[in-house]
Amino acid sequence: MEENSELQWALDHSLNTDCYPDVFDKNIGMDFHLSDHPNCYAEIASYSYSEERTVHIEITSYRGMCFDAIHYYATIKADGVRLCEDIEENGKKRTIIHGGYFGEEYNNLPREKRGIWTSRYEIEVERPVTQEEICKDPKRWEYYDVGDKTNAFESKSELIETAKKVAKIRFPEWNVEIEDNS
């Protein structure tokens, strides 16, 4: 697959609810700077014991009421950044981790920029619905057309393969870990 078609495939199998870039380089978010807060800086908000930025693929499942109705889901959760500031009080240095309201300068930034200065990036993994699925279970898929997206996978191995491929394309230099909670 060519690089552009690989990226398009990964984007077609991703659902972002925020304004994220197509590809996350290892230093994303580390360029944090606000003139209103000149002493603030970004550091990696790691959710693992690794010192490298990590993508966590979280696998979950759902079992429905009818026979064989089990579906698997994947969320890609990648280490974002914490916004910090070192302050000195009573001769002691301490670090404050900021959250919530950060002032007008921050609020006036484009949403795309604010979206990368967050502690975790989350992307749902999805796939297109097939004609075979619609024919096999028309009630389940009655509001879907062929090619519509769903985040429900019937095969755990297909889900893991898809999630790993999306993560490797969108986060090319990052470590990838799988957390199977299914």
Image (cartoon, rainbow, N blue to C red):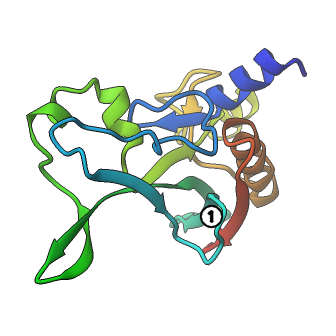
Report helix, strand or loop for mark 1.
strand
Quarter of the rendering occupied by the C terminus: bottom right
At a point 64% along the width and 22% down the height, the residue shown is: 147
Image x and y of residue 114, in percent: 31, 36
Quarter of the rendering occupied by the N terminus: top right
Q: Residues within 10 Å of mark 1 (few under 14, many from 20)?
A: some
Image x and y of residue 151, in percent: 56, 44
- Eyeballing the image, is 37 above or below 83? above
Asked whether residue 129 appears in the rendered view, the answer is no
The residue wearing badge 1 is 59
- Eyeballing the image, is 107 above or below 71? above
- Of 56 and 102, nearer the camera is 102
At a point 67% along the width and 42% down the height, the residue shown is: 171
Q: Examine the image and state in which quarter residue 178 appears.
A: bottom right
- Of 117 and 176, nearer the camera is 117
Q: Amino acid at mark 1?
A: Ile
- Eyeballing the image, is 15 above or below 73? above
Q: Examine the image and state in which quarter residue 69 appears.
A: bottom right
Q: Examine the image and state in which quarter residue 168 appears.
A: top right
Image x and y of residue 43, in percent: 45, 58
